[in-house]
Image (cartoon, rainbow, N blue to C red):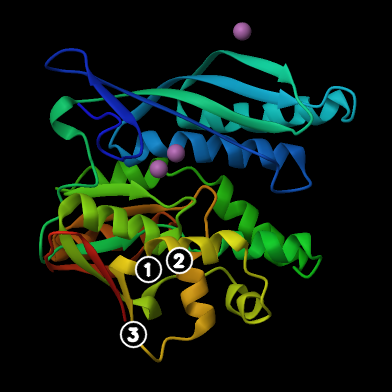
């Protein structure tokens, strides 16, 4: 049903009229000093693509590249423990994996999920007039840069880790009660990049209300200090032809819109009335959900307006 010809969060293969298989794979290099937290974040990040397709993860396998001579084995054990705790929280089952000796530590999951073939959520069916919901604050790339520069407080680190290790499971469960037209999750392309992917897939113009986007604490301050990862600039350059940025938007705000995210939130398109109800329900479950944009009109190429 979904393969290489349509860029989406995962591949989807129809098994029969009741069930389609979702397959995805992601792995990361460490983004925190704490291996247990890194394991949690990498697992949440890998599982997210199944949620973004409207599915439920069923089985997972570990992917590990580990510098056996340079790092203590306890680092690997703690990482796998963090991952397993998130896998258990998702309800999926760890069934295997593979590891190799590698100079650079990397960990992630290959995830298999299922979904009803009629309930697959893609990037390509957003409808004009829809509202767009985001379910996590942005700024994890900028925060990670600040953490590496030893400028982030303990509180900053705690918040960033909590956001990145949070599963998109509850958000996905709540959205499934509504008639969602399109869904994806925010990762390396940043909020603007992934929103543009929906715009291109759906052939729509999308307006992003930059002032409405929830941000991690101090992310703007760090962006103002220039603690912006190279990926944010690359994203802006890569997508600029199909994005209009209103004059008058702060440089730091723009950087945050393009900031590459690790294990970011879901981006959900659905009619405005349902979107308001959905956001309220998400908030009561502790999810930082917000309506951050709108599907404005048809566009052959797909277009994003930052206002
Ligand atoms: Co994705
Ligand atoms: Co992915
Ligand atoms: Co093997």
- Measuring from the top left, give residue 157's x and y in whole percent: 70, 60
- Within the image, what quadrant is residue 139 found in? bottom right
User: Is residue 119 among the parts visible in the rendering?
Assistant: yes
Q: Position of residue 20 (x, y in %)?
A: 23, 21
**Can you say which quadrant of the picture contains the N terminus?**
top left
Q: Earlier in the sequence, mark 1 or mark 3?
A: 1
Mark toward the viewer: 2 or 3: 2
x, y percent for residue 66 = 76, 25
The answer to whether residue 244 is left or right of residue 14 is: right
Residue pictured at 15% horizontal, 56% vertical:
203
The secondary structure type at the circle numbered 3 is: loop
Q: Residues within 10 Å of mark 2 (few under 14, many from 20)?
A: few
Residues under labels 1 and 3: Cα distance? 13 Å
Residue 150 relative to residue 232: left or right? right
* Distance from the alpha carbon under mark 2 to that under mark 3: 16 Å
Residue under circle 1?
A: 240
Residue 288 is at least partly visible in this image: no
The quadrant in which residue 76 appears is: top right
Residues 1 and 40: in front is 1
Is label 2's Cβ within 8 Å of ligand 1? no
Toward the viewer: 85 or 141? 141
Mark in front: 1 vs 3: 1
Q: Give the residue pinned by disc 2.
A: 237
Mark 1 neighbour density, 10 Å: few (under 14) some (14–19) many (20 or more): some
Q: Which residue is mark 3?
A: 246
Give the mark, 2 or 3, whose residue is nearer the N terminus: 2
């Amino acid at each position: 049903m979904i393969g290489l010809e349509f860029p989406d969060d995962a591949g989807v293969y129809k098994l029969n009229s009741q069930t389609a298989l979702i397959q995805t794979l992601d792995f990361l290099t460490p983004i925190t000093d704490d291996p247990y937290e890194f394991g949690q974040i990498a697992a949440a990040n890998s599982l997210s693509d199944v949620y973004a397709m409207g599915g439920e993860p069923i089985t997972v396998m570990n992917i590990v590249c580990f510098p056996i001579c340079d790092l203590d084995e306890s680092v690997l054990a703690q990482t796998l423990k963090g991952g397993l705790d998130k896998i258990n929280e998702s309800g999926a089952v760890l069934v295997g994996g593979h590891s190799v000796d590698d100079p650079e530590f990397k960990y992630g999951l290959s995830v298999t999920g299922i979904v009803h073939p009629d309930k697959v959520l893609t990037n390509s069916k957003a409808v004009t007039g829809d509202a767009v919901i985001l379910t996590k604050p942005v700024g994890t790339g900028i925060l990670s840069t600040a953490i590496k520069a030893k400028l982030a407080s303990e509180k900053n680190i705690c918040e960033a880790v909590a956001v990145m290790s949070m599963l998109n499971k509850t958000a996905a469960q709540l959205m499934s009660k509504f008639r969602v037209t399109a869904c994806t999750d925010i990762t390396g392309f940043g909020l603007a990049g992934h929103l543009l992917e929906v715009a291109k897939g759906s052939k729509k113009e999308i307006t992003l209300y930059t002032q409405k986007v929830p941000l991690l604490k101090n992310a703007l301050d760090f962006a103002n200090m220039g603690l912006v990862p190279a990926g944010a600039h690359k994203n802006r350059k890569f997508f600029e032809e199909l994005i209009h940025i209103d004059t008058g938007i702060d440089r730091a705000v723009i950087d945050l819109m393009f900031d590459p995210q690790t294990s970011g939130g879901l981006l959900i398109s659905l009619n405005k009335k349902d979107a308001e109800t959905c956001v309220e329900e998400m908030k009561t479950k502790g999810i930082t959900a917000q309506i951050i944009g709108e599907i404005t009109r048809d566009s052959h190429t797909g277009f994003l307006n930052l206002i």
